[in-house]
Image: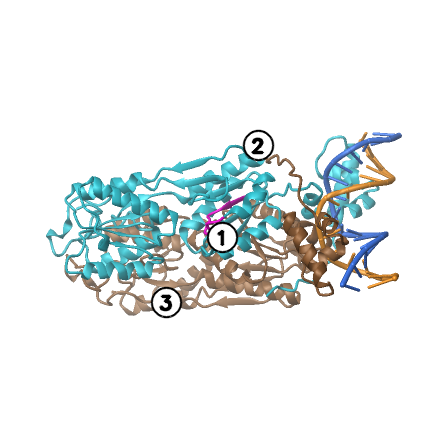
Chain colours: A brown, B cyan, C orange, D blue
DNA sequence: CTGAAAGCGCTTACAG
DNA sequence: CTGAAAGCGCTTACAG
C-alpha cells in the first residue's frame, strides 16, 4: 500500500528571489551559495529578498543538476530496536556530522527480501554511499553500482558475491581467550548459545569456541552447543533447559547481546553458581559483575562512516577489510561465592554467582 | 567542513531505455511505472531494455517534477545512543513500512542550535512530513512550513510557539500512583531524581511528584529533589550521596531511563533495602524485580508515524495533542527482604532489596 | 495506445 | 561582477 501524497505548492524559488532583488537567477544563486564575485550591495539585496520571501533552496533540484552528488548516505541495518544496531547507527551518525551529510536509515529485520527493497529505494534516491549490515547472501545486484563508483561498506558481516569494503569484528581472539580462561579454572562442561548458523558472526564465534575447546584438550560436546536462538526470551528458556539437565554445564558462553540478556536473566533466578561470559556488554553488566567479550558498535559505525567519507572524497579503490578488536572484560571476584548459600550483595562485591570465573 | 563530493556519471536514463526499446520516453515511463494503456509487447520491449541497461529510476528527478511530494520523512531525535530515542525511531520506522516512505534521521544531542541545522537540511530536502523531539523552545521558524501544509508532529515534548500535532506521555497519573503506593507503605522520605528542569518531561514528572506528596500529607522536602542529572553516571553518584546522608531517603524515584539505570546500579551495590521506582523500563528490570513506570517509546513513535501518514494523505487540520498512558508495574515481593542480612537470590525471588515496594 | 513539447528548480558552461 | 541559455531526468498536459 502506497501513501497518496498530494502535491504542495506555493514555494518561493530562486527565480522569485532574483526577481525581487532585481538580479538574474545566477547572481541570486551566487549570493545565496556564498560564492565570491558578488558586489556586497547586490548580495545584501538578494539576502533581503530571500528573507522576505522565506526562500528555502530545493536540494532535489540542486542535486539533480549536479548529477549523482547527493548529500545523503544510506544505512541499512537489522532493526532499531536492537541496541547493537542502534548504536551502530549512532556511530555512523557521529562520523557524518560536520560533513553536511544526511542519514537515511532503513531496517530489514534481517530479511534478505526486505534488504533488496530498501537498498533499491536508497539507490533510486542516489545516496552518495551505502553502508549495510547484510542479511542477503547474494549481493551481485550491487555490482553495477560499485562499478559506477558508489562506495559500499559492509558492516558486521562480510560481502560475498560483490567487492566492497567491510568492517568486522575479530570474532576469534577473545572468544577463545574466554574459553581458555574457563578451562584454566577447571571447567570442562562449557555450553555455547548462538544465533542461526547462517549468520556469519554466529558461525565465526562458534568456530572459535570449538577450536578453543580442542586447544584446551576438551572434546567439543555438541549437545552443549545450542544454535538458532534469535531473541532474549528463547535464550532464557534454552538456558533453563540446560540447567535442568542431569549433567548441566558448569559454564555458559552467550554469543551475542540478546542471548546474553536472556541467559543472564535465567541465571540470576535459577543458578547463581554457573559461570558465564557474554558477548556484547549491556546495561548493568558491570554492576552485576558479569564477564563479557565487549565490542563497541558505535566504534564500528564510526569507523565505517570514516571509510565512507574517504571513499566519497577519494573514490573507491582496493577494498579494505577491517577487523576491529573486541575486549575480554573479566568481572566478579574470581572466587565462587556459592560457598555460602546466602551470598551478600552489600558492599562492592558482585551480584551473587554471576562472576564470569569461578 | 563539507565533504567534496565528486560527480558520478554514466547512469542509464529513461531516455536510454526508450531509445533502445524504440519508443518515446513517455511510453517507457508508462511501462516502467506500471500504468495501463501500454501494449503488452511494448511493455516487454521496455522491460527488456531497462534490464539490459540496468536502468534505475532517479527519484530526485521524479520528485522534483512532482513538486513537493517526496517519499522521505524526517525524524529529529536527541541521540541514537539512548534507547528511548532509538526505540522511538524503531516505532516510526515500523509505521512507515509498506508505505514506500523513507526515513531520514538526524540527532541533535538535545542542542537547540543543532536542531535548527538538521531541521533546515530536512526542509531543503523537502521531506513530506517532519517529526521531532524538540530541544529548541522557539519553533516559530516552522510556521511557514506549516502554512505550506507540511505535517509536523512533536514527540515527547509539546510545541510552544508553533501549531502542530503532538504525541506526549501522560507524565502525571502513574508517577502520582507510584508515590501514593510508597506513601501507603509508610515511606515519608521519598527522593526524586530528575533531568534538567528546562526539559518538559522532567518538570511534568516533578510536578506530579510534588503534588502526590502533598496529597499524601507529606511536605515536599526540596533537599530530596535532585535535578539536572543528565546521565547514568551522575545518577549513580547522586544516589550514593543521598544514601550517605545522615537521614537518607527510604525510597527513591528516578524520572527517566538513564537516571533509573544509574540509581539501580548504586542501589544494587550499596543499599538493597531502599525502595525504588524507575521511570522507563530497561533490560533485566523485570529479572531484578524493579518497579517501574513503563512507557513504550515504540508505541509513541508508531503513533506519531500513523498521524504523519494520515496528515500526508489528508492534509493538516486541527492539531491533535495525544497523551499516551504509562503503566505502573509493581515488581518484587512486597516484603522487605532485608530482614535477613543475606537474602538469597535463588528460586524465582527478586534480587535482594530491589522490590519497588517494601 | 503513443509521442512531442514544456517544465520542476536549480547549476553548468559560457559570454560579456 | 553579472546574465542568458541550456540541461539534469523525470512528469505534466496535451495532441493524436
Q: Which is more toward the observer, B286 or A313?
A: A313
Cα–Cα span, label 2 and label 1: 44 Å
The image shows residue B117 at horizontal and vertical percentages of 55, 55
Residue beneath disc 3: A328
Image quarter where the N terminus of chain B lies is bottom right
Residue B74 in view in this figure: no
Host chain of mark 3? A
Which quarter of the picture shows residue B234? bottom left
Is the residue marked by circle 2 packed among few (<14), some (14-19), or many (20+) residues within 10 Å? few
Nearer the camera: disc 2 or disc 1: 2
- SS at mark 3? strand
Which quarter of the picture shows residue B176? top left
Is the residue marked by circle 1 packed among few (<14), some (14-19), or many (20+) residues within 10 Å? few
Host chain of mark 2? B
Is the residue marked by circle 3 packed among few (<14), some (14-19), or many (20+) residues within 10 Å? many
Which residue is found at the position 32% from the left and 61% from the top? Answer: B233
The span picked out in magenta is B129-138
Q: Earlier in the sequence, mark 3 or mark 1?
A: 1
Residue beneath disc 1: A198
Cα–Cα span, label 3 and label 1: 25 Å
Residue beneath disc 2: B314
Nearer the camera: disc 3 or disc 1: 3
Amino acid at each position: 500500500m502506497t501513501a497518496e501524497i498530494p502535491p504542495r505548492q506555493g514555494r518561493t524559488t530562486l527565480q522569485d528571489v532574483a526577481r525581487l532583488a532585481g538580479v538574474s537567477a545566477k547572481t541570486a544563486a551566487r549570493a545565496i551559495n556564498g560564492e565570491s564575485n558578488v558586489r556586497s550591495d547586490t548580495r545584501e539585496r538578494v539576502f533581503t529578498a530571500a528573507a522576505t520571501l522565506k526562500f528555502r533552496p530545493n536540494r532535489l533540484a540542486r542535486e539533480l543538476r549536479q548529477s549523482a552528488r547527493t548529500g545523503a548516505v544510506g544505512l541499512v541495518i537489522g532493526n532499531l530496536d536492537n541496541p547493537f544496531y542502534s548504536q551502530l547507527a549512532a556511530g555512523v551518525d557521529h562520523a557524518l556530522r560536520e560533513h553536511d551529510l544526511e542519514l537515511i536509515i532503513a531496517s530489514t529485520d534481517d530479511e534478505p527480501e526486505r534488504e533488496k527493497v530498501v537498498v533499491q529505494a536508497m539507490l533510486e534516491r542516489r545516496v552518495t554511499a551505502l553502508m549495510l549490515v547484510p542479511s542477503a547472501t547474494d549481493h551481485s545486484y550491487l555490482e553495477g553500482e560499485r562499478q559506477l563508483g558508489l562506495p559500499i561498506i559492509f558492516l558486521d558481516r562480510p560481502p560475498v558475491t560483490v567487492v566492497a569494503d567491510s568492517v568486522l569484528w575479530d570474532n576469534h581472539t577473545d572468544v577463545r581467550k574466554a574459553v581458555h580462561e574457563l578451562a584454566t579454572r577447571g571447567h570442562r562442561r562449557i555450553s555455547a548459545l548462538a544465533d542461526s548458523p547462517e549468520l556469519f558472526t554466529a558461525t565465526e564465534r562458534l568456530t572459535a569456541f570449538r577450536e578453543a575447546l580442542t586447544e584446551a584438550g576438551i572434546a567439543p560436546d555438541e549437545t552443549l552447543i545450542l544454535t538458532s536462538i534469535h531473541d532474549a526470551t528463547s535464550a532464557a528458556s534454552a538456558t533453563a533447559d540446560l540447567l535442568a539437565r542431569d549433567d548441566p554445564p558448569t559454564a555458559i558462553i552467550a554469543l551475542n547481546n540478546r542471548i546474553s540478556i536472556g541467559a543472564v536473566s535465567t541465571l540470576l533466578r535459577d543458578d547463581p553458581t554457573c559461570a558465564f561470559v557474554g558477548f556484547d556488554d549491556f546495561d548493568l553488566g558491570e554492576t552485576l559483575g558479569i564477564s563479557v567479550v565487549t565490542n563497541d558498535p558505535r566504534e564500528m559505525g564510526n569507523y565505517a562512516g570514516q571509510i565512507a567519507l574517504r571513499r566519497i572524497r577519494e573514490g573507491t579503490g582496493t577494498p579494505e577489510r577491517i577487523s576491529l578488536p573486541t575486549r575480554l572484560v573479566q568481572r566478579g571476584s574470581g572466587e565462587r561465592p556459592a560457598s555460602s548459600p546466602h551470598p551478600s550483595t552489600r558492599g562492592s562485591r558482585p551480584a551473587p554467582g554471576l562472576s564470569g570465573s569461578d
